[in-house]
Image (cartoon, coloured by chain):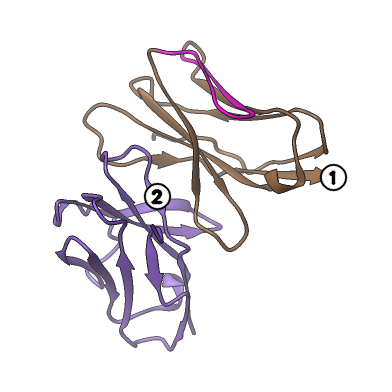
């Protein structure tokens, strides 16, 4: 299995632009997580899907952030409009057992200038 | 508020020595704990987990110890190798909670 696949690996965008991050979870996993990692705040859970349904989005920082999971093999995290403080590494993770043994992707390093 | 592992210390060890990485948590209701390893430019990688009904669990070259009395978790790495150099995170969760709470991490540097 190729593991959790995220794209792009790096994204540089100007403030105000829309950014879409993509994730393909491991086949057969029914839970998907989006995390954000910064030096100041560490790893923060943004949103958690179970069986394609958002279960907990309390970590989504603002209405500028939205996430979708149209099917079991694909999820997106969108930021519109993006701001410099959104600069971080965004990780997608998937699991077959809820919060246990989550497998992380390589991450997308987002820089908003 | 609830927190796990408030600091990001750096632990430097000689190759071949044993390493001990510590983590403190604050939620006494936490009942499941995970150690992750994150190498530069990569996502966190699951190492080992432990539930609160245990106080010790062993894997390959790694041992996790849980002391619920003082809310402390440790990861022991035997015969540390250069490939063990990374940031190590503890994470925890508990009943009714939907998210893993991650600590801020400890950087392990292995000197050849």
Q: Which residues are magenta?
A: B54-68
Name the residue rendered at 40%, 58% in the picture: A3
Left or right: A112, with A17 as reference point? right
Q: CA distance from mark 2 to mark 1?
A: 29 Å
Instruction: Give the residue displayed 30% in from the left and 54% down from the top.
Output: A33
| Residue A2 spot, x, y in % from top left | 41, 61
Display colour for chain B: brown
Pointer 1 indicates a residue of which chain? B
Q: Residue A70 appears at what percent x and percent y?
A: 14, 68
Which quadrant does the C terminus of chain B fall into? Answer: top right
Q: Position of residue A36 (x, y in %)?
A: 41, 59
Label number found at residue A103: 2
Label 2 Cα crowd, 10 Å radius (few <14 / some 14-19 / many 20+): many
Q: Is residue B41 above or below residue B53?
A: below
Is residue B101 within the magenta segment?
Answer: no
Write down the quadrant of residue B101 in the picture. top left
Name, please, the residue furthest toward the front.
A1
The tag on residue A66 is: none
Which residue is nearer to you in this view: B14 or A40? B14
Task: Residue at 45% x, 77% y: name it.
Answer: A84
Q: Residue at x 38, y 66 (%)?
A: A5
Q: On the image, numbered disc 1 is attached to which residue?
A: B111
A39, B60: nearer the viewer: B60
Query: The chain coloured purple carries which letter?
Result: A
Q: Is residue B100 above or below residue A45?
A: above
């Amino acid at each position: 299995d190729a593991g959790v696949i995220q794209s792009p690996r790096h994204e540089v965008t100007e403030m105000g632009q829309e950014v879409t991050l993509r994730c393909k979870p491991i086949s057969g996993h029914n839970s998907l997580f989006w995390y954000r990692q910064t030096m100041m705040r560490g790893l923060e859970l943004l949103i958690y899907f179970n069986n394609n349904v958002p279960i907990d989005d309390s970590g989504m920082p603002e209405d500028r952030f939205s996430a979708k999971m149209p099917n079991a093999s694909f999820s997106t995290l969108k930021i519109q409009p993006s701001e410099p403080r959104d600069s971080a590494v965004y990780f997608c993770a998937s699991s077959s057992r809820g919060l246990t043994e989550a497998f992380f992707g390589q991450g997308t390093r987002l820089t908003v200038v | 508020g609830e927190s796990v592992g408030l600091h990001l210390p750096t632990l430097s060890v000689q190759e071949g020595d044993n390493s001990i990485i510590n983590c403190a948590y604050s939620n006494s209701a936490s009942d499941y704990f995970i150690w992750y390893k994150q190498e530069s430019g990569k996502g966190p990688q699951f190492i080992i987990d432990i539930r609160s009904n245990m106080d010790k669990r062993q894997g390959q070259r790694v041992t996790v110890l849980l002391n619920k009395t003082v809310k402390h978790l440790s990861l022991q790495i035997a015969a540390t190798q250069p490939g063990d150099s990374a940031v190590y995170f503890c994470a925890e969760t508990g009943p009714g909670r939907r998210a893993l709470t991650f600590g801020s991490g400890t950087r392990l540097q292995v000197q050849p």
